[in-house]
Image (cartoon, coloured by chain):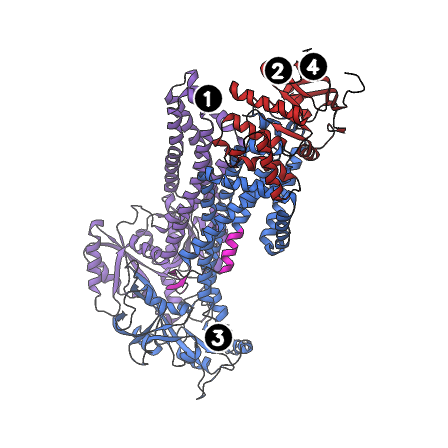
Chain colours: A red, B purple, C blue
Amino acid sequence: MGIAERPLPLVEIRELSKVYQRGREAVEVLHHVDLAIPDGDFLALMGPSGSGKSTLLNLIAGLDSPTDGSLRVAGRRIDRMSSGELARWRAAHVGFVFQFYNLLPALSAQKNVELPLLLTHLPAARRRRNALIALELVGILDRASHKPAQLSGGQQQRVAIARAIVSDPTLLVCDEPTGDLDRHSAEEVLTLLQRLNRDYGKTMIMVTHDPKAAEFARRTLHLDKGTLVEQVA
Amino acid sequence: MKYLPLLVAALLRRKARTLLTMLSVTAAFALFGMLDAVRVAFEAPESLIGIDRLIVASRFSIIQPLPLGYLSRIQSVAGVKAITYANWFGGVYQDPKNFFPNFAVDADTYLAMYPELVLPPAERKAFLDTRTGAIVGQALAEQFGWKIGDKIPLQATIFPRKDGSNAWTFDLVGIYGVSDPALRGLERQMLFRWDYFDEGRDPRYRPGTVGWYAVRIDDPTHASRVAGAIDRQFANSADETKTQSERDFQRSFAKQVGDIGLIVTGIMGAVFFTLLLMTGNAMSQSIRERIPELAVLKTIGFSDLAVVGLVLAESGALLVLGGVAGMALAWSTLPAVRDLSAGQLDVTMQPQSWELGLCLIFLIALAVGLPPALKAKRISIVDALAGH
Amino acid sequence: MPWPDTEAIVGGLRKPLRASGLALAVSVGLWAWFTAPLMLLAPVALFAVWLIASTQGRQVLAIAWMGIVTIPQRLGATSVVLVGIAGVVGVCVALQAMAEGFEATLRSAGDDDTAIVLRAGADAELSSGLDRAAVTLIAQAPGILRDDRDVPIASAEVVVVANLPKRSTGTDANVEVRGVGREVWLLRRGVHIIQGRRFKPGLRELIVGRGAQAQFRGATPGSVIRLNNQDWRVVGVFSSGDAHESELWGDAESVGAAYRRNGFQSVTARLVQPQVIERLAAALTHDPRLRVDVQTTRAYYGKQSQRLTQVIRGVGTVVVVIMALGAVFGALNTTYAAVAGRSLEIATLRALGFTAVPVVLAVMLETMALALAGGLLGAGVAWAAFNGYQVSTLGSNFSQVVFQFDVTPALLLQGVQWAVGIGFVGGFFPAVRAASLPVIHALRAQ
């Protein structure tokens, strides 16, 4: 692969630090991290508890702001945005998949998937159609009218993935997406993510502590005590 | 006591909720304190004082006076030990808003009949010696800043003077207290001499008559027999009498205000319990949320009883703090209520209200704390820790 | 949440500032709502349009809807708040309706066209007294309207109190007996016989007011009432729509004779026109043969209702304020708990890109909808249970005044106003809390 063909990095991180104040003590969770994630990448972030992997993910997803350093996604600096700007930015650019799915129990699968579309100007009919397309894509269209409580863990996570992709975000962010699933469901979900990356070119960042899960990614980065330790596959 | 830090920690766990819950308990008991003060005022005090006294008044109407000549005839009824008489005056001091009961009494026999009015001997003598003399209760004297030697003008509303004017003036010769704090209501009265009043009033306003007689009988158990004997004396005369015990006499007034008092108390009782319902709900919710924590305590080795006790102590602490604060608030705002109602609603919280309130606090603490406490006792440690 | 979030620590200085800002916003909102609720109509209408038309508005509705559909899951807590607010509103409305009813009953007994003359210094008819000479002088005073036969339309009246057993309790209560003059039918034109006939002057006959008939045993046509040991026959029932309905009426001379009275309590007279009251008052008060007070019946009956209305209003205000505070605390508690219970949902929405404003508005909308429902419930119950409810109490003539609770539309609106106010305060602070929940902590708190 030549330098000229290398795609422009979608996510560009320089000297990123994050310090939490816990009582009187300052805890540095991330320590001058540099990282570039190209468009179309599927990156697995691994590391022990407290290594800072979730913090890094939250920063990239615009859920949190760094203490120091710069963070550029698709050419825009997001480390300087206010919380309102971040919210609008997330709505447009980021899709989330959480460990515990975080579906809203009161809404049907389809309504859950429609949620991000409420933030767009799409009319109701289009919102509905897009949600059904996303559900079809994750292979769970037949459960569109079920409430989360009526679905298995694997099915709930697929609904969550459909919700993450329905607004066609730039970036898909997954926080331990298989952490609460049995082996079989986990493999299904990971295969689905892999397919979305391969067939639709979705850029993905996944935090996991499971090496088997990381195998589905294109590459894996290890974090330890707030610094990156790249491992050559 | 060694569990105290645990209790404090539980209460401080969600400070906002603890505070809000306590404040709604406070609101509920502030309301309770005021209502119960009203209720107690409506029912004549359950006191033994005056149990041997009867009131003789006109049978036909409260406004009909009785002839003074009845005095000796009532006295001659078997069972009557002592007698006195009085006449409602209804005078106004400066402004109708300053309402207080004032009436003319036969000084010597009246003070003998009502030993609960405590007057220093010198002042008593002055009252007996001064025709224009008047005595007032401690509370009333304090309210208007009166002291012995003052001249107190009253504007008559019923009885004009001989010269047609309404201005009566009395010399304050004594300030009495009451023998029992529960009777403090009696300290808001003014008494003056009947002979001065009778001589001074416009002759068209039936001099030689009295408003009512008060009679002491030898044995309270004979009350209805003596009352019947008195009323029979005057049956079929121009002025028939109605004799009843002093408490029944007072009660008949409360009954006349009747409906309103009943409705007000009824409505507010319902609201008191609504407020408590809200509080109880918040408290049991707070405890339910903490069931995993309680399971941890049990894992460590706390006995079931200790866990139940801890939960009950928590509900108890909230209710005692909030409830006592509420009743204290009621106690301190009742004077403001008196001013707001232009002196019409003048009640104070009596010891019996405090007692009832404390009982309620105790019962409600149990009612609110017991269900979650028992639930905490029953929880399986394994389930609770797993978050089920 | 195991750790305080950074923002809270860093923002430690801003916190008091923000808190006082919020308190100010709440005070201004409440002030506007209670002083000029109509002023808020336009902004509210605009808000409704915004909700329906804009993207953010749709977000608000979507979030609020999620809150509302989860209400059945927290039915206990929610219904407690509903009932609590309904209780406050119900009591508020009922107490005011009682005061209103009492005031209306006495107020309508008076008008500007009639004047009442009492002995100087008397604060009510019962404590007044006028002898025959005075009564004659008063009737001839200037400004009093005369009938076809040139007789002054004035009624010299005897007011006494009799004991009659109440229907409800069976115990004796004081009833006002009014002996009236022959001109009374022209004087009080609102009085109509609705059953039986008028009493005949000179006979021991009575007519009873509609309210008295309902409240007292024996106050029905055909029965006999004992007044001062004499038998009086009830021959009719009258309506007047005011405080007189609590009274028993008979011929003034006969009633006076029964009570061995040779005088009267008051003279009520119809004026030529309202303006002459001053002339009449001047003429009578400057007459050296008289010692009287003159006022319009409107002024007189206004004063009579003042005392009790003041009591009810004073007590009512204190009680309603305490109760409203209790309800606010309860609503705050429940809404805080609801927000805490939904913190994960709210954080998820925020992660998906929902901004703070829709979250705040949705929580407030939900609480205020709940409060509104409670207010309507309370007002409805108060109306159903108390409107027209007839009671009696001791009036200033030392006798029973019968009146009805008057639940007016204005009172109902006022009740709902209270409810929405409670909902506003109860929802505002939890809503702000919901919006400022730190997203990542809420997401992690499993």
Residue at image position (58%, 27%) is: C443
Gap between marks 2 and 3 measured at Cα: 102 Å
Q: Amino acid at mark 4?
A: Leu
In the structure shown, which secondary structural element does the residue marked by tag 3 occupy? strand
Viewer-nearest of labels 2 and 3? 2
Tell me which chain the residue with mark 2 is part of.
A
In the structure shown, which secondary structural element does the residue marked by tag 4 occupy? strand
Q: Amino acid at mark 2?
A: Glu
Tell me which chain the residue with mark 3 is part of.
C
Gap between marks 4 and 1 measured at Cα: 35 Å
Magenta stretch bounds: C389-417
- Residue C143 is left or right of residue B45, and the answer is right
Residue count near mark 2 (Cα–Cα under 10 Å), binned few <14, some 14–19, many ≥20: few
Q: Amino acid at mark 1?
A: Ala
Q: What residue is shown with label 4?
A: A228
Q: What residue is shown with label 1?
A: B386
Mark drawn on residue A215: 2
Against B155, is A61 above or below? above
Gap between marks 1 and 3 measured at Cα: 83 Å
Mark drawn on residue C370: none
Locate residue B283: give its quadrant.
top left
Where's the N terminus of chain C, which quadrant? Answer: top right
Gap between marks 4 and 2 measured at Cα: 18 Å
Residue count near mark 4 (Cα–Cα under 10 Å), binned few <14, some 14–19, many ≥20: many
Q: Are marks 2 and 3 on the same chain?
A: no
Q: Is residue C409 magenta?
A: yes
For the residues bearing labels 2 and 1, Cβ distance under 8 angstroms:
no
Q: What residue is shown with label 3?
A: C115
Q: Are marks 4 and 2 on the same chain?
A: yes
